[in-house]
Image: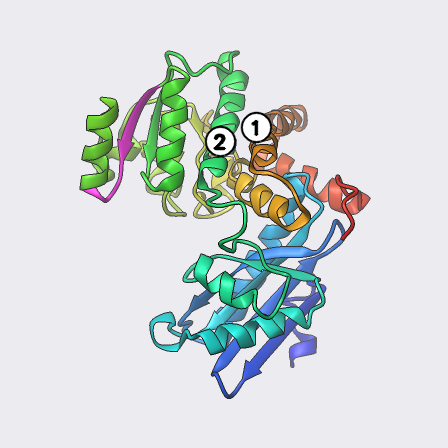
Amino acid sequence: MVFDSTAHADHEQVSYFTDPETGLQAIVAIHDTTLGPSLGGTRMLDYASEDAALEDVLRLSRAMTYKAAAADLPLGGGKAVILGDPDESKSEALLEAYGRAVDCLTGRYITSVDVNSGVEDMDVIARETDHVVGTSDGLDDPSPITAHGVFHGIRACAESVYGTRSMADHHVVIQGLGKVGRSLAEELLADGAAVTVTDVDDDAVDAFAREYDVETVEPDAVYSRSCDVFAPCAIGGVINDDTIPRLDCDIVAGGANNILAERRHATVLREQDILYAPDYVINGAGLITVAKEYFGGTREEAYEEAAAIGDRLLEMIELADERDTTVLEAADAYAENRIEGGERTSTTPL
């Protein structure tokens, strides 16, 4: 029975939406709104089953609560999934129906871009609801701002390990040269770091190496490359039982989501004296940007708040040292203290 399920017992609201005319089947999960309305992207996937879709949306919405709280934002955590193959099922009519579904939640959930949903899709959804960010008239691409937050997070890690935030004379290996990875590499180079890059796209790697005269490494060899900082900026799950023994670095800190294959790997890294910066903390500037878009703010303000991620992360690192635990545990405690206190960091009306 749905109401007897323990899967979503910690969620405030889980809503199922259907529209036979357009074929819409969607689930919106609102995890927690203690600090403000829930915000999270909408992904469209051809899930193997409705149970798989539910499991995904519940996991992601819970993570968004912690991400927002750790970023000191007046937001809660939510997420949505649309079931179906986007190549076959996505249409303007379906997205408009989904927009009406979001609107009926009266602002408790704010949607944005995610897997298989982009700016153009948000523009269609915005025809039916105001509770959407990431549209074409928003604050533009958040990727450089996300990278700016990761850059300052890496500098905070360097201060903890090496006693200085300057990246001069430190070597960073960046896995993934997408929008975030490339912007991160450029900021690190400007700060004096030595940078090595890798990506499954050989052309992107070659072009970047020629432009900036940096070293490259093959994707399969990246984990064994000796460096000070390993920065995953592509796919998740790259820190796992197979890769950890190969790591030759002092810090793991990057822009990718879900870097750890399992939560326990934070402890394994700590046991090997490798400092791990929780990804939901260090890559939180993307969320900061869309929050600025929703509540009202500028791109410049988003950059300023992204830079503050470094100080916040250093506070979590110090807390972990005090408690003799992982930085992931300390980050969770930071977020939970904010939620339990119920204190918003903005007086902007909701």
- Whether the residues at callouts 2 and 1 have beta carbons within 8 Å, the answer is yes
How crowded is the residue under tag 2: few (<14 C-alpha within 10 Å), some, or many (20+)? many
Residue at figure coordinates x 47%, y 14% from the top left: 166
Q: Nearer the viewer, residue 287 or 283?
A: 287
Q: Residue at the bottom extreme?
A: 20
The quadrant where residue 90 appears: bottom left
- Residue 267 against residue 128 in the figure, above or below: above
The x and y percentages for residue 135 are 52, 56
The x and y percentages for residue 78 are 62, 59
What segment carries the magenta color? 194-202
- Residue marked by disc 1: 307
Amino acid beneath label 2: His
Badge count:
2
Residue at figure coordinates x 45%, y 76% from the top left: 49
The quadrant where residue 179 appears: top left
Magenta region includes residue 339:
no
Q: Disc 2 or 1, which lies upstream in sequence?
A: 2
How crowded is the residue under tag 1: few (<14 C-alpha within 10 Å), some, or many (20+)? many
Magenta region includes residue 201:
yes
The quadrant where residue 344 appears: top right
- Residue marked by disc 2: 148
Quarter in which the N terminus is drawn:
bottom right
Q: Residue at the front extreme?
A: 137
* Numbered disc 1: secondary structure: helix
Rounded to the nearest whole Å, what is the CA distance between mark 2 and mark 1?
A: 7 Å
The x and y percentages for residue 318 are 64, 23
